[in-house]
Image (spheres, grey):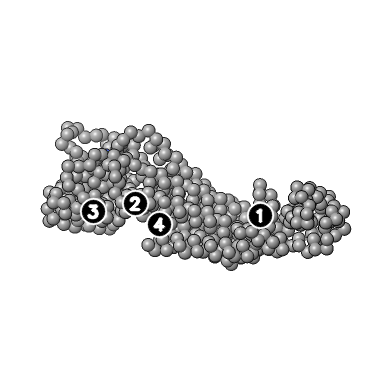
Amino acid sequence: MALWSGRFTENVSEFTQRFGASLPVDKALYAQDIAGSQAHARMLASAGVIEPADAEAIVEGLDRVKARIEAGDFAFDINDEDIHMSVERALIADIGDAGARLHTGRSRNDQVATDTRLFAKQRCEDLMAANVALRQALVRQAEAHFDVVLPGYTHMQHAQPVLFSHHMLAYVWMLARDFERLAAARTAADASPLGSAALAGTTYPLDRQMTAAELGFSRVIPNSLDAVSDRDFLLDLSYACSVSCMHLSRLCEEIVLWSSSEFGFIELSDAFSTGSSIMPQKKNPDFAELIRGKTGRVVGDLVALLITMKALPLAYNKDLQEDKEGAIDAAKTLEDCLVCAAGMIETMRVVPEAMTAQAKKGYLAATDVADYLAKKGMPFRRAHEVVGHLVLVCEQRGCDLDDLTLADFKAESDLFEEDITASLDLESIVAARTTEGGTGHAAVRAQLALAKDALAADEAVLAG
Ligand code: ARG
């Protein structure tokens, strides 16, 4: 029998019961649902709407329901449409009339919005913590291999040499922005809908500020219609998850490439690799590929919710029940991906010789040679052409720029002098990039300090 049985003479079919139920998904919100109900009951008593003894019985009864759920001793019944009904039915079965007073001045509409916001806040915090752990792993690798030089790429072609630490830190900054997006999603969720009831508020003297404060919300949503129908905070969470997963996918794409025989820049630990059932020699970067692959479903979760929301009139519509599954999945998927990526980065073996060997190929000094001429007064566009021709000479001879003699250089321009050959080694090329944010050793050291400051600040946010 449904909790609304008064108005009905017939039950829904078993099929429609299952079709309409959200319990399999929203039972994950049991703790938030119980906390919300306890706050509501205490507030009802303090406002004189129910007796203090009833509120006390409700709070204690809900503690018992929670303990049973956590002990695996709670039989979820599919005849209960959702977690709100499961908990309320169990409470009423336990304490009778006092339990039947809990839903005074409340609707499942403000109840579900409250639960979902509490849940979203918690998940944002969990994800922020996992984000910090991955950044720490990246920073540790950057510090451990600070000076290693590898080719920097544009169009996946060798472009200019960069420090490995610089490359790792690029991901640290992406993740620092992800942290901000998660923090913003948390702020968006941090407002209380409770007390909005079904859509219009109630006739009881509810104290919304009181329940908001008890539940740790920093503010109350000012409009009851908006309060029960707004799911922007879940979109913000899903968007933050999508962008972060996209960043992890980019990192993992590089891990897949770097661990290939062609690159050999890193070796993943056995704990983050799999073999082949047929090819005995194989060591595959499955988990990096899987993170790359999971990005699709996280972005799908975001798009699904956007489309669910796009034509909903005010206020609550049952479509909104479709909001939780994707958001829960997006958060869980990103959390797993962050944890997996952190372990993979932490345990990978960096192969400096392979990186440096590649950095020696592909005329990575070309821009520096052009800069050499430009600094001696040749217009850069002209210098570009001169060095382009030098590269052509190298191509024809099958050598690199630092194999050319001073005479070879002078044949292209009189501006070349003795010092040109001395400045073409990788170390000098990297060290010369002194611009703030550039790959020069000093600039990367300064950047590393900034990244660690940002990390410490975010750790402090988490510590509260
Ligand atoms: N299970 C519902 C949901 O997740 C709870 C709210 C139902 N409200 C209603 N009026 N049917 O959205």
Which x, y percent locates residue 410? Answer: 86, 56
Residue type beneath disc 4: Asp
Q: Which residue is mark 2?
A: 190
- Circle 1 sits in a helix, a strand or a loop, which is it? strand
Q: First in sequence, mark 1 or 2: give its number.
A: 1
Q: First in sequence, mark 4 or 2: give its number.
A: 4
Whether tag 1 and tag 2 are in contact, CB under 8 A, the answer is: no
Mark 4 vs mark 1: in front: 1
Whether tag 4 and tag 3 are in contact, CB under 8 A, the answer is: no
Mark 4 vs mark 2: in front: 2
Mark 4 crowdedness (10 Å alpha carbons): few <14, some 14-19, many ≥20: some
Q: Which mark is residue 333?
A: none
Whether tag 2 and tag 3 are in contact, CB under 8 A, the answer is: no
Q: Which residue is mark 3?
A: 210
Q: First in sequence, mark 4 or 3: give its number.
A: 4
Q: Gap between marks 2 and 3, in whole Å?
A: 15 Å
Q: Gap between marks 4 and 1, in whole Å?
A: 34 Å
Residue type beneath disc 1: Gly
Residue type beneath disc 3: Met
Instruction: From the viewer's side, name the closer residue of 188 and 296.
Output: 188
Q: First in sequence, mark 3 or 1: give its number.
A: 1
Q: Which mark is residue 152?
A: 1
- Is ligand 1 within 8 Å of the beta carbon of the residue shown at mark 4? no
Q: Which mark is residue 126?
A: 4
